[in-house]
Amino acid sequence: MENKKSVLTLISLIVLGGSVVGSLFVGVLVYFLLSSSGVEGALVKAVYSTVIIQIAFLIPVFMVRMLIDKYIVAKIKEVTKALQEVSTGNLDYQVRIDGDDELAQLAESFERMRISMKTIMDKLEEGEI
């Protein structure tokens, strides 16, 4: 099986890259402000502020990533698994996704299609069609 990157991983990398650039920008601004004001240890304070900003940003990003994985990506993986099973002829594989969102509606539509296909295949095997 191919090693594919998850969309969630790519989004996380983009957000992480943006946070690094943003915190470095803030660190540079802090350094220039402190050094132009004649504050001792401006570089050290700027580095500390950069690290603190980065850590403060990473915590909510990680939490949002976990929520996206739980509520969106897991549902997509379940529908994908069902598609793979049915495409190989396993018409008994059921997909069940709870919720009222678009992914649950997609799973419900897929389940109706699977049941219709199974009914047609059963009728063909029994010679009714």
Image (spheres, helix red, strand yellow):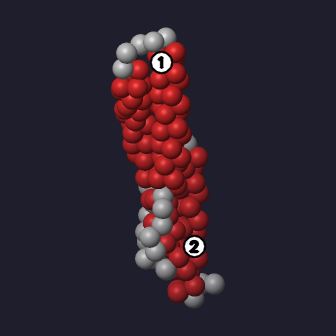
When the figure is inspected, residue 58 is found, relative to residue 88, above or below; the finding is above
How many numbered marks, from 0 up? Answer: 2
Give the structural element (helix, strand or loop) at label 2. Answer: helix
Please state the horizontal and vertical placement of residue 124, each as a whole percent of the image: 57, 85
Position in image of residue 112 (x %, y %): 56, 61
Image position of 24 (left or right of 117): left
The structure residue drawn at horizontal position 45% and vertical position 12%, both measured from the top left corner, is 38
Q: Amino acid at mark 2?
A: Met
Q: Pointer 1: what residue?
A: 35
Residue 93 at x, y percent in the picture? 43, 69
Q: In front: mark 2 or mark 1?
A: 1
Q: Residues within 10 Å of mark 2 (few under 14, many from 20)?
A: some
Q: Which mark is residue 124?
A: none
Work out whether 84 lies above or below 50.
Answer: below
Of 34 and 19, the residue lying toward us: 34
Foreground residue, 41 or 108? 41
Residue tagged 2: 117
**Tag 2 and tag 1, C-beta contact below 8 Å:** no
Residue 29 to residue 117: above or below: above
Q: Quadrant of the C terminus?
A: bottom right
Task: Give coordinates of residue 121: x percent, y percent.
Answer: 55, 80
